[in-house]
């Protein structure tokens, strides 16, 4: 049995994973992302202009806060735009307009802790199903 974790849903990541498992005769796969580990904590608010606690995003509060947690030396908040509009069609509406300057290391600390504990719980549950 193999467990593969990746931190992002980029096409190149999945292409590499698919190539690595192509030689396997049999595989059972569950594709999970950080959102799957904290989905029960997401708080959908009345407006997309608010930071939705624990909701993932692209290049805004979630990802920037996580970078401030794990690698703050790589983040220059002076370069972060106040507002970011993403023209992607197949994403939830709350991700279309995001506010990267709302990111904080404290929020990243919360997100990391929740993602790790939720991930351990989720993966342990999946492994228990296999046994």
Image (tube, rainbow, N blue to C red):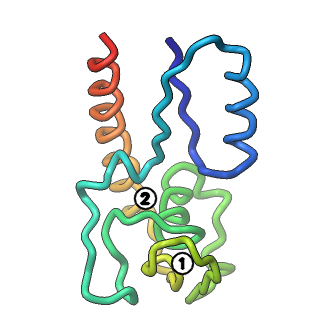
Note whether 57 is above or below 99 in the view shown: above
Where residue 28 sits in the image (x, y, percent)?
49, 23
Seen at 64% across and 57% down, the residue is: 73
Note whether 115 is above or below 97 in the view shown: above
Residue 67: quadrant of the picture: bottom right
Position of 36 compared to 71: left or right? left
Q: Earlier in the sequence, mark 2 or mark 1?
A: 1
Q: In this view of the protein, which residue sits in the foreground, 62 or 70?
A: 62
Where residue 89 sits in the image (x, y, percent)?
59, 78
Residue ID for mark 1: 100
Position of 97 compared to 128: left or right? right
Is there CB contact under 8 Å for labels 2 and 1?
Answer: no
Residue 90: quadrant of the picture: bottom right
Residue ID for mark 2: 108
Seen at 44% across and 48% down, the residue is: 34
Q: How far is mark 2 from mark 1, CA to CA?
A: 13 Å
């Amino acid at each position: 049995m193999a467990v593969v974790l990746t931190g992002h849903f980029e096409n190149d990541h999945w292409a590499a994973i698919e190539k690595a498992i192509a030689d396997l005769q049999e595989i059972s796969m569950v594709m999970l992302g950080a959102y799957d580990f904290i989905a029960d904590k997401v708080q959908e608010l009345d407006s997309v202009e608010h930071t939705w606690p624990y909701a993932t995003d692209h290049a805004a509060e979630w990802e920037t806060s996580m970078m401030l947690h794990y690698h703050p030396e790589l983040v220059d908040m002076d370069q972060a735009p106040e507002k970011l509009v993403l023209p992607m069609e197949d994403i939830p509406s709350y991700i279309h307009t995001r506010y990267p300057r709302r990111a904080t290391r404290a929020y990243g600390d919360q997100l990391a802790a929740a993602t790790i504990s939720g991930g351990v719980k989720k993966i342990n549950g999946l492994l228990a199903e296999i046994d």
